[in-house]
Image (cartoon, rainbow, N blue to C red):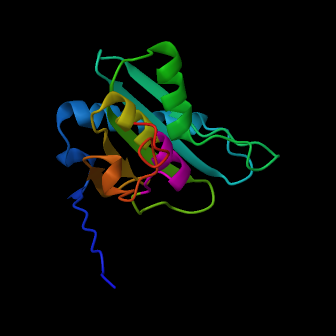
């Protein structure tokens, strides 16, 4: 038997004010767009701003559906929109902000497992990591340099023997 140790390094900012001007603007876009989320069931609203290599910013919000789990997370809404509108353009950064109508979200909220897998697919296809910045309503912002920092054991083309 052998034990495998996996280490992850994340950067934690005390607040949005510690981000660069450009990063702060993108996080503010994620914060502002989350109010447009359609979340009548969970009351948990997520906003995303994706920064693309061509300078475009694509926004997304979670979209729930009474037929669970037919809804879509904000991260996948934005990624799918970017893939549709700007096929082949690399995603550089992903900014996520979450809030709830029922309680204060004070803990940085990372992408869910399904979104991590979708982000990994894009990282793998563009052969370049995507920096992920995430926060709650206010407070700390966490940065992962790649989705692999949040999903260290990946399932992709190599797993399916497609490379």
Disc tally is 0
Q: x, y percentage for residue 21?
A: 19, 33
**Would you say residue 31 sits in the magenta stretch?**
no
- Quarter of the image for residue 64 reads top right
Residue 52 horizontal/vertical position (percent):
33, 23
Question: Which residue corresponds to the image point at 28% horizontal and 39% vertical from the top-left?
Answer: 129
- In the picture, residue 28 is in which quadrant? top left
Point 28% across, 51% down: residue: 144
Instruction: Tell which of 4 and 104 is nearer to you.
Output: 4
Up-down relation of residue 39 to residue 154 (above or below):
above
Is 88 or 134 nearer to us in this picture? 88
Task: Give the residue drawn at x 18%, y 48%.
Answer: 18
Residue at the (29%, 46%) spot, across then down: 146
Q: Position of residue 22 (x, y in %)?
A: 22, 30
Task: Tell me if I can see residue 9 in this picture.
Answer: yes
Which quadrant of the view contains residue 132?
top left
Residue sitting nearer the eye, 127 or 71:
127
Specify start and end residues of the magenta stretch as a single range: 109-118
Inspect this view and state whether residue 13 appears. no
């Amino acid at each position: 038997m052998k034990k495998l140790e996996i280490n992850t390094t994340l950067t934690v900012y005390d607040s949005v004010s510690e981000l660069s001007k450009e990063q702060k603007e993108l996080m503010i876009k994620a914060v502002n767009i989350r109010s447009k989320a359609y979340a009548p069931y969970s009351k948990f609203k997520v906003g995303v701003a994706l920064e693309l290599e061509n300078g475009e910013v694509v926004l997304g919000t979670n979209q729930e559906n009474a037929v669970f789990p037919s809804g879509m997370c904000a991260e996948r809404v934005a990624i799918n929109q970017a893939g549709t509108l700007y096929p082949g353009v690399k995603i550089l950064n992903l900014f996520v902000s979450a809030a709830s109508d029922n309680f204060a979200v004070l803990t940085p909220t990372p992408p869910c497992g399904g979104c991590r897998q979708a982000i990994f697919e894009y990282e793998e296809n563009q052969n370049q990591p995507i920096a992920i910045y995430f926060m709650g309503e206010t407070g700390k912002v966490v940065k992962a340099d790649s989705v692999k920092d949040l999903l260290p054991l990946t399932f992709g083309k190599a797993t399916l023997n497609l490379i």
